[in-house]
Each structure stands twice: as C-alpha cells, then as structure tokens.
Amino acid sequence: MHVWKFGGTSVGKPERMHSIRNLVTSDGGRKFVVLSALSGTTNALLSIAESLKANLPDEAAEKIEHLKAHYDSFIRELYKTSEGFAKGQQIIENEFSFIRSLTRIRPFTLKQEKELVAEGELLSTQMFAAYLEEQGVPSVLLPALEFMRIDADGEPELDVIEQKLREIMRGHDDKEIIVTQGFICRNPRGEVDNLKRGGSDYTASLIGGAIRAAEVQIWTDIDGMHNNDPRIVKKTFPIRELTFDEAAELAYFGAKILHPSTITPAKLRGVPVRLKNTMDPQAPGTLIAERTSTSSDQVFKAIAAKDGITALYIHSTRMLNAYGFLRRIFEIFEKYKTPVDLIATSEVSVSVTIDNTTNIQALMDELRTFCDLEEPDYDQAIVCVVGNFSADHPGIALKVLESLKNIPIRMISYGGTEHNISLLMHGRYKAEALNALNEGLFGL
C-alpha cells in the first residue's frame, strides 16, 4: 500500500482535484491519500482568528463569508452531478456553521483557534471524498482526529497511531482509496491540535510508518528536491536520489519542499519517500531511502539555507578546564524548550545558534548567573552544504570555503556528521552565498 500526500496548491482548483482523482486511480493500487487544505485557506482561517482575538466579530464575519463564497464557487466546478453538488453544498454549510459558532465564544482562545484552523483540512477531504463517491471510486474517509495523536510535548505517538489505525482500517479492505486529513491531530487532553505548519508531510510519513507502506509519495508543484533554492539561484537541477540523513539535513536547514520532521517516521520504519510533481506526473522526482544507487564518489549533493537565526556567544567566568560548563548551559536551553542549530566550542567559550527567540531574554538572564554573554547577533542565516563528506574525501572544506572567499563567515560546523557542512553568516549574504556555492561546487 502507498501513502500519497497532496499539498494546498495540488488541490487548490477543481480541475486539480480532478487530476488527483485520475492520478490515484490510474494504476489500480490501494492508496492512503492525505490532503492539505485548499491553497490560501489556512492563511484565511488564521486571519479570521486574528480578528476574533482582537474582538472584532464583524470583521471576522465578513472574512468568513468571503471564504465561504470561494468554496461555493469551487464546488460548482468540482462536481459533475446534481447529487454530488448537493453533497458538496451540505459539507460547506455544515463546516461554515461550525466556523460561525466559534465567533460567538468569548474569550477566543488558542483552543478555538486550533479548531478553526483545522477546518481547512476537514473541508478539503470531505469535498474530495464526496467527489470520489460521485465518480464511483471505492473509497472511504477516515478522520485523522480518530487516530492521529501527539503527546504533551507536541510529538506524535507513532505506536498509538499504528494501533488506532490498525483498528480503524479493519472492515475497509474493499476500499481502493482511503482519504484523510493532513496536519490535524488530537493532544493528550483530546482537544483538536496540529502538527504545526507544513505538517501534512509529517502526517503522510507517520501513516506510512504506521502501516509499513511500500512508499510515501509527497506531491507538490515542483519536480523533486533541487540542488539549490530555485527561487534565488537560476541554474538548479532536481536531485534524483538522497539518503534519509541527507534529506533530513536539507529539510531542517531550509529546503522548503520537505517539512523538517517528515523523514523521521519513514526512516524509523524503513519506508522510502518519493517527492513528485503534480504538474508533471511522469517526471521521476526525488527518491529518499536508506541507501541509494548514486555513486559514493558524488561528494556534493545540495545546498539549503535557513533564515531568522540568532547567534549567542557564551563565555565561562571560571578558570580553564572547568567541567560541567556545557551541561549547565544546555540544561537552560532544555528548560526553556529552545533547540540549538549549530554549536562551536573552545576551552572557555561556546557559540550557539537558535531559530526560536520566544524565551531568549529569560534564557540569557539565567545564563548570566554563571557566565558572560556578548550581545546576540540577530538576522543571521545558516547555509548548509550536504553530501558525502567521509574522511576519505580530502579538500571538501577547502572547496566550500574557497567558494565563499568573499563572504564573511561567523561560525562553521563540520564533522558532526558525514553529510553536512553548515556556515553562519549575516542574512544579507545568503543569496550571494547560495549562488557562489552553486558555481563553486556544481560549476553552474
């Protein structure tokens, strides 16, 4: 069984939903189809939430009716029969009735906001499932809220998801297509929650791992993962194969086509992930697996960049060789749930980068109780070069740094894995660095 995930742009127009139906039924194989909200819907729902949090119900109501008008227009082109259209109308009336009910709740809390934002996926999947039914496709809609669970730290509970899915899927062996929502889930309190933005990819991987799928396919509007950011660099090319570790590094450090968490469940269960293009289904895309057929002599695979980075410079106030210094530092980062991207250390100082500054002031205040801090560097960027950097390949760092000889580098991380060289620089240099590396490493 395969798991196929389609993003917002892939389901953003009626004709694209028609194309997805043709895609998922073309080879006759059973599929678990994961859908995002229609493109633009999540942002519209978040805008409605902002109006409600600001206690502007009339403004929120106007936004709701504007969004509903879009869906009313959408179903007129989606369905081919009067029965299908009537079913689509009923779905929209039911969901928008619930959306309107949320506007009457005071105060409008984070709980209601998560329920509101979940409506995007609930709408798209019900509409698509009704379209499959209209077309006579043996299918069933399995609500993600019945099996997708996260723990108190917001982490998916893969074993729980597997158990619940196994129970729910009994009795549906005759269904060719199983449809469900991406992104949404329930938390330990049983409330509607989500896997954060981009989490539909994560949903697909979690389902793929839970059912031990033959393959997870992530369908987007680009031909696989490219060797560089095509929005910034003109001469890029799609990468045909990546290992799980290489893809995870690229996703974490800024490759927009793939959600950073997606690879983990698939890797745990050994399920290959393939990135495909809905605009060009015949294109091979990118295959991500434990091992690839790509020659190990291919040293450099791809480049990615991550914005919004803050660098902290921490100095010990004690003598040299003081043990326990690093432990105390990272206990504070753990206390404030602030992950570290890069780290560089010397005998008496530590430099780290973070991308979440929510608790930075409290974190710095506590660090100052036993060490000195320099003023943080904000608006930094991490540029990540990924490939096969084993100890047997000489001159790798030299080639990277030679490509960036005209760009000031604040920090370098190299050697933690055999797949990643990461460099910190001010964000103003990011585009220049990506282009320079594209030329220096790939000759483009």
Image: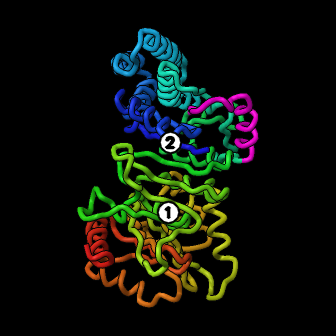
User: x, y (%) of residue 161?
Assistant: 70, 41
Secondary structure beneath dot 1 equals helix
Amino acid carrying label 2: it is Lys
Name the one closer to the observer, 441 or 214: 214
User: x, y (%) of residue 11?
Assistant: 40, 34
Range shown magenta? 159-180
Task: Quadrant for residue 47, please give it.
Answer: top left
> In the rendered image, which residue does mark 2 sit on?
5
The residues bearing labels 2 and 1 have C-alpha atoms spaced at a distance of 17 Å
At 70% from the left edge and 31% from the top edge, which residue is drawn?
190
User: x, y (%) of residue 287?
Assistant: 49, 59
> In the rendered image, which residue does mark 1 sit on?
247
Q: Answer with mark 2 or mark 1, whichever residue precedes in sequence.
A: 2
Residue 177, magenta (yes or no) = yes
- The answer to whether residue 129 is left or right of residue 207 is left
Q: How crowded is mark 1: few (under 14 residues within 10 Å), some or many (20 or more)?
A: many
Amino acid carrying label 1: it is Ala
> Up-down: is 19 above or below 79?
below
Q: Which of the two marks, 2 or 1, is nearer to us in this view?
A: 2
At 57% from the left edge and 68% from the top edge, which residue is drawn?
291
At 68% from the left edge and 35% from the top edge, which residue is drawn?
147
> Up-down: is 439 above or below 110?
below
Name the one closer to the observer, 362 or 379: 379
Q: Residue 51: tell me if it is visible.
A: yes
Name the one closer to the observer, 85 or 345: 85
